[in-house]
Amino acid sequence: MPCKILFSAENWSTWEAPLRTALDETGVAYDLVSDAAPETVDYVVYAPSSGLLDFTPFTSLKAVLSLWAGVEKIVGNETLQVPLARMVDPGLTEGMTEWVTGHVLRHHLGMDAHIRGLKGKWRKDVPPLARDRKVTILGLGALGADAARALKALNFDVAGWSRSPKTLDGIETFTGDDGLAEALRRAEILVLLLPLTPGTEDLLNADRLARLPKGAMIVNPGRGPLIDDTALLSALDSGQVGHATLDVFRVEPLPADHPFWLHPKVTVTPHIASETRPASASRVIAENVRRGEAGEPFVHLVDRSAGY
Ligand code: NDP
């Protein structure tokens, strides 16, 4: 009997063909549908935007396979009693590294001054070489580690912070509270690529913003609540933080009257830092279905107690 896979996310018309191609390649017998009686479903391909919240009626479920890398909207769902895998997609990673590298280079080179215009003043502010620019990345997982390597390849002086110790060639790594203080102290440009969990919410509060070098630039494609918005606005107004490039927010879409929209030291991008790419991500989903059917362990499993 073929396994039943329910697609419970947006853009079925975009995903159906690449998912079928990837599933065909595995040789697994499957029935891929966008609607089904819950008790007949073996796997749910999931995004929170589908609105599916109650997994109780899914009595035959073997796993939920998230199309999103961030799982904060589902990880605490107590109706979900089967393995939850998150998305680690080479296309998503590549896109994030491009976005992070682009914004770090923009701040490093001071490109905004020329894009906005020097207003008739022939003023030469020569930036240091990347080797003399300290960048810190908070979060050294699939996305943070790849961005760290790309920035290192451009010669930036890169450090990173994570929960467990990491070894990355040429990159100074930190863990724990003392490690965080050290990682922040050196961060002329700070990139946030942490998941949102109870341990990371409001991580960048007034106290930690004060530890950054004066005028530090922040780039946040992680999650909005990693930063205390009020503390960030005061740090921007006092000059403690030079600029914040924010892709993610507590409320999305960012409300029209939010001060971030018009703040001269804030760049808002509408949660576009990177997207799950159907062609490569479908292979990740298909591989987990293959594993499930073969009785092998799933990849990219979420540690529900850690929250990511
Ligand atoms: P991973 O789970 O691979 O990496 C998370 C990293 O954060 C790990 O290094 C982990 O440490 C570290 N971490 C987690 N909790 C803590 C903590 N309490 N203290 C210190 N370090 C911690 O996730 P990804 O790299 O795949 O994704 C990161 C986030 O990026 C996602 O959760 C999502 O929020 C965001 N994202 C944003 C997108 C966008 O378009 N804006 C697109 C995709 C993702 P350790 O290695 O020890 O586990």
Image: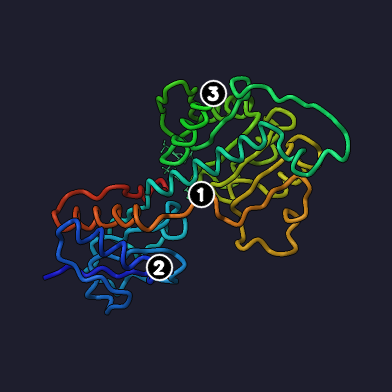
- Determine the residue positioned at 22% across, 75% down: 40
Q: CA distance from mark 3 to mark 2?
A: 40 Å
- Determine the residue positioned at 41% across, 63% down: 47
Check if mark 2's residue and mark 1's residue have beta carbons within 8 Å. no
The residue wearing badge 1 is 196
- Per the image, label 1 sits on a secondary structure element best described as loop
- Determine the residue positioned at 32% across, 68% down: 16
Amino acid type indicated by mark 3: Asn
- Indicate if the residue with disc 1 has its beta carbon within 8 Å of ligand 1: yes
The nearer-to-camera label among 2 and 1 is: 2
The nearer-to-camera label among 3 and 2 is: 3
- Per the image, label 3 sits on a secondary structure element best described as loop
Q: Considering the image in quadrants, where does the N terminus appear?
A: bottom left
The residue wearing badge 3 is 155
Q: In which quadrant of the rendered view does residue 133 lie?
A: top right
Q: In which quadrant of the rendered view does residue 18 lie?
A: bottom left
- Indicate if the residue with disc 2 has its beta carbon within 8 Å of ligand 1: no
Q: Residue furthest right?
A: 120
Q: Residue furthest left?
A: 1
- Per the image, label 2 sits on a secondary structure element best described as loop
Q: Earlier in the sequence, mark 3 or mark 2?
A: 2
Q: Position of residue 289 (x, y in %)?
A: 22, 58
The residue wearing badge 2 is 9
The nearer-to-camera label among 1 and 3 is: 3
Q: Is residue 115 above or below residue 25?
A: above
Near mark 2 (Cα within 10 A), the count class, few <14, some 14-19 or many ≥20, is some
Q: CA distance from mark 2 to mark 1?
A: 21 Å
Say which of 264 and 297 sits in front: 264
Q: Position of residue 190 (x, y in %)?
A: 61, 35
